[in-house]
Amino acid sequence: MKGIDRGAEIVIKKWVKLKPWEKLLIVTSEETIEEAQALKKFALRRSASVDLMIVEKTGMKIGVFFDQHEDIFANYHVIIGATNYSLVTTKAAKKAIKKGKKFLSLPLCTNDGKAMLSYDFMTMDTKKSKMLAMVIMKYLNSASVIHITSKNGTDLKVYKRNRKAGFFNGVLKDGKGYSSASIEVYVPIEETKSEGVMVLDGSLGYIGKADYPTKIDISQGKITKIEDTITGCQLQEYLKSYDDERVWVASELGIGLNSQSKCRGKCYIEDESAYGTFHIGFGRNLALGGVHEASGHYDLVCREPNIYADNRQIMMEGKIITPEPEVY
Protein backbone atom coordinates (compact mmCIF):
# COMPACT_ATOMS: atom_id res chain seq x y z
CA MET A 1 0.00 0.00 0.00
CA LYS A 2 1.39 3.38 -0.99
CA GLY A 3 0.47 7.02 -0.97
CA ILE A 4 -2.26 8.60 1.12
CA ASP A 5 -3.88 5.28 2.07
CA ARG A 6 -0.68 4.04 3.72
CA GLY A 7 -0.48 7.10 5.96
CA ALA A 8 -4.22 7.09 6.69
CA GLU A 9 -4.10 3.46 7.81
CA ILE A 10 -1.12 4.16 10.09
CA VAL A 11 -3.00 7.05 11.72
CA ILE A 12 -6.21 5.12 12.37
CA LYS A 13 -4.81 1.67 13.11
CA LYS A 14 -1.52 2.40 14.91
CA TRP A 15 -1.84 5.92 16.30
CA VAL A 16 -5.52 6.43 17.15
CA LYS A 17 -6.39 2.73 17.57
CA LEU A 18 -10.06 3.61 17.17
CA LYS A 19 -12.52 1.45 19.15
CA PRO A 20 -15.90 0.28 17.73
CA TRP A 21 -17.91 2.30 20.26
CA GLU A 22 -15.98 5.55 19.86
CA LYS A 23 -17.38 8.54 17.97
CA LEU A 24 -14.72 10.16 15.81
CA LEU A 25 -14.67 13.68 14.41
CA ILE A 26 -12.21 14.56 11.64
CA VAL A 27 -11.79 18.32 11.28
CA THR A 28 -10.62 19.30 7.81
CA SER A 29 -10.94 21.90 5.05
CA GLU A 30 -11.51 21.83 1.30
CA GLU A 31 -7.73 21.98 0.86
CA THR A 32 -7.20 18.71 2.76
CA ILE A 33 -10.45 16.89 1.99
CA GLU A 34 -8.76 14.05 0.06
CA GLU A 35 -6.65 13.08 3.05
CA ALA A 36 -9.62 13.44 5.39
CA GLN A 37 -11.68 11.11 3.20
CA ALA A 38 -8.90 8.51 3.35
CA LEU A 39 -8.84 8.77 7.14
CA LYS A 40 -12.62 8.36 7.22
CA LYS A 41 -12.44 5.27 4.98
CA PHE A 42 -10.13 3.44 7.36
CA ALA A 43 -11.95 4.72 10.44
CA LEU A 44 -15.27 3.30 9.20
CA ARG A 45 -13.69 -0.16 9.20
CA ARG A 46 -13.35 0.16 12.97
CA SER A 47 -16.28 2.37 14.04
CA ALA A 48 -19.72 3.17 12.60
CA SER A 49 -19.67 6.74 13.90
CA VAL A 50 -17.26 8.92 11.92
CA ASP A 51 -18.03 12.53 11.03
CA LEU A 52 -16.23 15.11 8.92
CA MET A 53 -16.27 18.79 9.84
CA ILE A 54 -15.18 21.03 6.96
CA VAL A 55 -14.08 24.43 8.18
CA GLU A 56 -14.38 27.45 5.93
CA LYS A 57 -11.62 29.56 7.46
CA THR A 58 -8.17 28.36 6.45
CA GLY A 59 -4.64 29.63 6.93
CA MET A 60 -2.66 30.36 10.05
CA LYS A 61 -5.62 31.95 11.90
CA ILE A 62 -7.87 28.93 11.50
CA GLY A 63 -7.76 28.47 15.28
CA VAL A 64 -9.86 31.59 15.91
CA PHE A 65 -13.11 29.68 15.33
CA PHE A 66 -12.04 26.93 17.76
CA ASP A 67 -11.13 29.52 20.37
CA GLN A 68 -14.60 31.01 20.08
CA HIS A 69 -16.42 27.63 20.24
CA GLU A 70 -14.77 25.79 23.12
CA ASP A 71 -17.45 23.09 23.38
CA ILE A 72 -17.57 22.12 19.72
CA PHE A 73 -15.93 18.73 20.38
CA ALA A 74 -18.23 17.83 23.30
CA ASN A 75 -20.16 15.06 21.50
CA TYR A 76 -17.11 13.06 20.38
CA HIS A 77 -14.71 10.62 22.00
CA VAL A 78 -11.89 11.16 19.49
CA ILE A 79 -10.91 14.22 17.44
CA ILE A 80 -8.38 14.39 14.61
CA GLY A 81 -7.32 17.89 13.59
CA ALA A 82 -6.57 17.24 9.90
CA THR A 83 -6.26 20.79 8.61
CA ASN A 84 -3.23 22.52 7.13
CA TYR A 85 -2.50 24.35 10.38
CA SER A 86 -2.47 22.80 13.83
CA LEU A 87 -5.52 23.10 16.09
CA VAL A 88 -3.90 21.64 19.18
CA THR A 89 -3.17 24.98 20.84
CA THR A 90 -6.80 26.15 20.55
CA LYS A 91 -9.15 26.51 23.52
CA ALA A 92 -11.50 23.88 22.11
CA ALA A 93 -8.68 21.32 21.90
CA LYS A 94 -7.44 22.15 25.38
CA LYS A 95 -10.92 21.73 26.84
CA ALA A 96 -11.47 18.43 25.03
CA ILE A 97 -8.14 17.07 26.30
CA LYS A 98 -8.92 18.24 29.84
CA LYS A 99 -12.24 16.37 29.71
CA GLY A 100 -10.45 13.14 28.77
CA LYS A 101 -11.23 13.09 25.07
CA LYS A 102 -8.60 11.79 22.64
CA PHE A 103 -7.03 14.40 20.38
CA LEU A 104 -4.57 13.91 17.52
CA SER A 105 -2.93 16.96 15.98
CA LEU A 106 -2.38 16.14 12.30
CA PRO A 107 -1.43 19.35 10.47
CA LEU A 108 -1.24 18.51 6.78
CA CYS A 109 0.55 21.58 5.41
CA THR A 110 3.25 20.88 2.79
CA ASN A 111 5.16 23.14 0.43
CA ASP A 112 5.67 20.74 -2.47
CA GLY A 113 2.09 19.83 -3.37
CA LYS A 114 2.54 16.30 -2.04
CA ALA A 115 0.05 14.95 0.50
CA MET A 116 1.56 14.77 3.99
CA LEU A 117 0.07 11.31 4.60
CA SER A 118 2.15 9.96 1.70
CA TYR A 119 5.48 11.04 3.24
CA ASP A 120 7.80 8.24 4.37
CA PHE A 121 8.37 9.79 7.82
CA MET A 122 4.90 8.53 8.75
CA THR A 123 6.40 5.01 8.96
CA MET A 124 8.72 5.73 11.93
CA ASP A 125 8.60 2.93 14.51
CA THR A 126 6.67 4.51 17.38
CA LYS A 127 8.17 2.15 19.97
CA LYS A 128 11.67 3.28 19.04
CA SER A 129 10.70 6.94 19.20
CA LYS A 130 9.20 6.35 22.65
CA MET A 131 12.47 4.75 23.81
CA LEU A 132 14.44 7.78 22.60
CA ALA A 133 12.02 10.13 24.34
CA MET A 134 12.27 8.32 27.66
CA VAL A 135 16.07 8.57 27.58
CA ILE A 136 16.25 12.34 27.23
CA MET A 137 13.11 13.23 29.21
CA LYS A 138 14.72 11.73 32.30
CA TYR A 139 17.43 14.37 32.19
CA LEU A 140 15.25 17.23 30.98
CA ASN A 141 12.76 16.74 33.80
CA SER A 142 15.46 16.87 36.47
CA ALA A 143 16.95 20.09 35.05
CA SER A 144 15.93 23.71 35.53
CA VAL A 145 18.09 25.23 32.77
CA ILE A 146 18.63 23.92 29.24
CA HIS A 147 21.55 25.30 27.24
CA ILE A 148 21.62 24.89 23.46
CA THR A 149 24.62 25.61 21.24
CA SER A 150 25.59 24.78 17.67
CA LYS A 151 28.54 25.14 15.34
CA ASN A 152 26.53 27.71 13.36
CA GLY A 153 26.43 30.04 16.34
CA THR A 154 23.38 29.18 18.42
CA ASP A 155 23.98 29.94 22.11
CA LEU A 156 20.66 29.98 23.91
CA LYS A 157 19.51 29.24 27.45
CA VAL A 158 15.90 28.35 28.21
CA TYR A 159 14.38 27.73 31.61
CA LYS A 160 11.82 25.19 32.79
CA ARG A 161 11.43 25.37 36.55
CA ASN A 162 8.22 23.54 37.50
CA ARG A 163 7.60 22.60 33.86
CA LYS A 164 7.49 18.98 32.67
CA ALA A 165 8.79 17.62 29.38
CA GLY A 166 6.45 15.49 27.30
CA PHE A 167 6.66 13.66 23.99
CA PHE A 168 4.66 13.03 20.86
CA ASN A 169 4.92 9.97 18.63
CA GLY A 170 1.46 9.97 17.09
CA VAL A 171 0.17 7.24 19.42
CA LEU A 172 -2.68 8.58 21.56
CA LYS A 173 -2.22 5.94 24.24
CA ASP A 174 1.44 6.89 24.74
CA GLY A 175 0.43 10.53 25.07
CA LYS A 176 -2.36 9.67 27.56
CA GLY A 177 -4.98 10.55 24.98
CA TYR A 178 -3.24 13.45 23.27
CA SER A 179 -0.53 13.40 20.61
CA SER A 180 0.80 14.90 17.41
CA ALA A 181 2.22 13.67 14.11
CA SER A 182 5.38 15.57 15.05
CA ILE A 183 7.56 12.91 16.70
CA GLU A 184 9.43 14.90 19.32
CA VAL A 185 10.15 15.68 22.94
CA TYR A 186 8.71 19.04 23.94
CA VAL A 187 9.21 21.34 26.92
CA PRO A 188 6.84 24.25 27.69
CA ILE A 189 9.63 26.62 28.71
CA GLU A 190 9.24 29.62 31.00
CA GLU A 191 7.97 32.39 28.80
CA THR A 192 9.91 35.39 30.16
CA LYS A 193 13.36 33.93 30.73
CA SER A 194 14.96 32.67 27.50
CA GLU A 195 18.23 34.46 26.75
CA GLY A 196 20.74 34.29 23.93
CA VAL A 197 20.98 33.70 20.21
CA MET A 198 19.55 31.05 17.92
CA VAL A 199 20.83 30.70 14.37
CA LEU A 200 17.95 29.62 12.17
CA ASP A 201 19.38 27.16 9.63
CA GLY A 202 16.65 24.55 9.23
CA SER A 203 13.15 25.70 8.43
CA LEU A 204 10.63 28.41 9.23
CA GLY A 205 7.76 26.09 10.06
CA TYR A 206 4.91 26.55 7.60
CA ILE A 207 6.93 28.92 5.40
CA GLY A 208 9.56 26.39 4.36
CA LYS A 209 13.33 26.03 4.22
CA ALA A 210 15.62 28.59 5.81
CA ASP A 211 17.84 29.20 2.79
CA TYR A 212 20.10 31.66 4.59
CA PRO A 213 21.31 30.99 8.18
CA THR A 214 19.81 33.82 10.20
CA LYS A 215 20.71 35.10 13.66
CA ILE A 216 17.78 35.71 16.02
CA ASP A 217 18.37 37.50 19.33
CA ILE A 218 16.14 36.57 22.26
CA SER A 219 16.01 38.45 25.56
CA GLN A 220 13.65 38.02 28.50
CA GLY A 221 11.86 35.35 26.49
CA LYS A 222 11.11 37.49 23.45
CA ILE A 223 12.62 38.01 19.99
CA THR A 224 14.38 41.37 20.05
CA LYS A 225 16.24 41.30 16.73
CA ILE A 226 16.22 39.29 13.51
CA GLU A 227 19.21 39.42 11.18
CA ASP A 228 18.54 41.19 7.89
CA THR A 229 18.78 38.25 5.48
CA ILE A 230 16.24 37.01 2.93
CA THR A 231 15.19 34.37 5.46
CA GLY A 232 15.07 36.98 8.20
CA CYS A 233 12.82 39.21 6.10
CA GLN A 234 10.47 36.28 5.45
CA LEU A 235 10.24 35.67 9.17
CA GLN A 236 9.66 39.35 9.95
CA GLU A 237 6.77 39.50 7.48
CA TYR A 238 5.25 36.33 8.86
CA LEU A 239 5.41 37.57 12.45
CA LYS A 240 3.93 40.94 11.58
CA SER A 241 1.03 39.25 9.79
CA TYR A 242 -0.26 37.99 13.16
CA ASP A 243 -0.57 41.57 14.44
CA ASP A 244 0.06 40.16 17.92
CA GLU A 245 3.15 40.91 19.99
CA ARG A 246 2.58 37.71 21.98
CA VAL A 247 3.68 35.50 19.07
CA TRP A 248 7.23 36.88 19.44
CA VAL A 249 7.57 35.03 22.78
CA ALA A 250 9.64 31.81 23.01
CA SER A 251 7.37 29.26 24.66
CA GLU A 252 8.55 25.76 23.69
CA LEU A 253 11.71 23.75 23.19
CA GLY A 254 11.29 20.77 20.90
CA ILE A 255 13.77 18.01 20.03
CA GLY A 256 13.12 15.92 16.90
CA LEU A 257 13.10 12.12 17.28
CA ASN A 258 12.06 10.82 13.86
CA SER A 259 14.95 9.13 12.04
CA GLN A 260 12.76 8.81 8.93
CA SER A 261 12.32 12.59 8.71
CA LYS A 262 14.51 15.05 6.86
CA CYS A 263 14.54 18.80 7.45
CA ARG A 264 14.06 19.97 3.87
CA GLY A 265 11.46 22.71 4.16
CA LYS A 266 8.90 20.64 2.27
CA CYS A 267 6.68 19.67 5.19
CA TYR A 268 6.41 21.53 8.48
CA ILE A 269 5.75 18.42 10.57
CA GLU A 270 8.58 16.48 8.97
CA ASP A 271 11.02 19.35 9.53
CA GLU A 272 10.37 19.78 13.24
CA SER A 273 10.34 16.05 13.97
CA ALA A 274 13.63 15.26 12.18
CA TYR A 275 16.20 13.55 14.39
CA GLY A 276 19.24 15.80 14.71
CA THR A 277 17.25 19.03 15.00
CA PHE A 278 15.75 21.17 17.71
CA HIS A 279 13.11 23.84 17.42
CA ILE A 280 11.94 26.78 19.43
CA GLY A 281 8.19 27.26 19.42
CA PHE A 282 6.83 30.79 19.67
CA GLY A 283 3.40 31.99 20.72
CA ARG A 284 0.71 30.01 22.49
CA ASN A 285 1.75 26.99 24.57
CA LEU A 286 -1.35 26.27 26.69
CA ALA A 287 -1.89 22.74 25.38
CA LEU A 288 1.75 21.86 26.05
CA GLY A 289 1.54 22.73 29.74
CA GLY A 290 2.55 26.40 29.61
CA VAL A 291 0.63 29.55 30.51
CA HIS A 292 1.20 31.78 27.48
CA GLU A 293 -1.74 32.93 25.38
CA ALA A 294 -1.36 34.20 21.81
CA SER A 295 -3.20 34.15 18.50
CA GLY A 296 -1.02 31.36 17.13
CA HIS A 297 1.99 29.07 17.48
CA TYR A 298 4.85 28.41 15.06
CA ASP A 299 8.22 26.66 15.20
CA LEU A 300 11.69 27.60 13.98
CA VAL A 301 13.90 24.57 13.30
CA CYS A 302 17.69 24.46 13.70
CA ARG A 303 20.20 21.72 12.93
CA GLU A 304 22.79 19.68 14.85
CA PRO A 305 22.47 21.11 18.36
CA ASN A 306 24.53 20.48 21.44
CA ILE A 307 22.05 20.33 24.32
CA TYR A 308 22.85 20.48 28.03
CA ALA A 309 20.30 19.73 30.77
CA ASP A 310 21.74 21.81 33.62
CA ASN A 311 25.41 20.86 33.21
CA ARG A 312 24.89 17.41 31.70
CA GLN A 313 25.25 17.11 27.93
CA ILE A 314 22.49 14.99 26.43
CA MET A 315 22.99 15.73 22.73
CA MET A 316 26.13 16.37 20.68
CA GLU A 317 25.79 17.78 17.16
CA GLY A 318 22.28 16.36 16.89
CA LYS A 319 23.01 12.91 18.35
CA ILE A 320 21.76 11.72 21.72
CA ILE A 321 24.81 10.83 23.84
CA THR A 322 23.22 9.74 27.12
CA PRO A 323 22.94 5.94 26.88
CA GLU A 324 21.13 5.84 23.55
CA PRO A 325 18.91 2.88 22.60
CA GLU A 326 20.22 0.96 19.61
CA VAL A 327 17.56 1.91 17.08
CA TYR A 328 19.45 2.66 13.86
Image (cartoon, grey):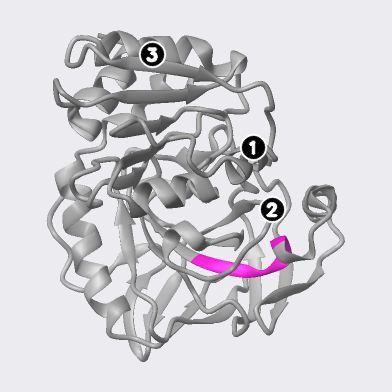
- Which corner quadrant of the image does residue 57 belong to? top right
| Lateral position of residue 226 relative to residue 115, left or right | right
* Kind of residue indicated by mark 3: Ile
Q: Depth-wise, is mark 1 or mark 3 nearer the camera?
A: 1
Specify the label residue 4 is tagged with: 3
Q: Nearer the viewer, residue 188 or 199?
A: 188
- Which corner quadrant of the image does residue 266 belong to? top right
Q: What is the secondary structure assignment of the residue under circle 2?
A: loop
Residue 78 image position (x, y, % from top left): 30, 33
3D distance between C-alphas at marks 3 and 2: 31 Å
Q: Where does the magenta region start and end? A: 247-252
Evaluate whether residue 121 shows in this view.
Answer: no
* Kind of residue indicated by mark 2: Ser
* Residue that carries the numbered disc 1 in the rendered image: 65
* Residue that carries the numbered disc 2 in the rendered image: 295
The N terminus: image quadrant = top left
Q: Depth-wise, is mark 3 or mark 2 nearer the camera?
A: 2
N-terminal of the pair, mark 1 or mark 3, is 3
N-terminal of the pair, mark 2 or mark 1, is 1
Neighbor class of circle 1 (other Cα within 10 Å; few <14, some 14-19, many 20+) is some
Q: What is the secondary structure assignment of the residue under circle 1?
A: helix
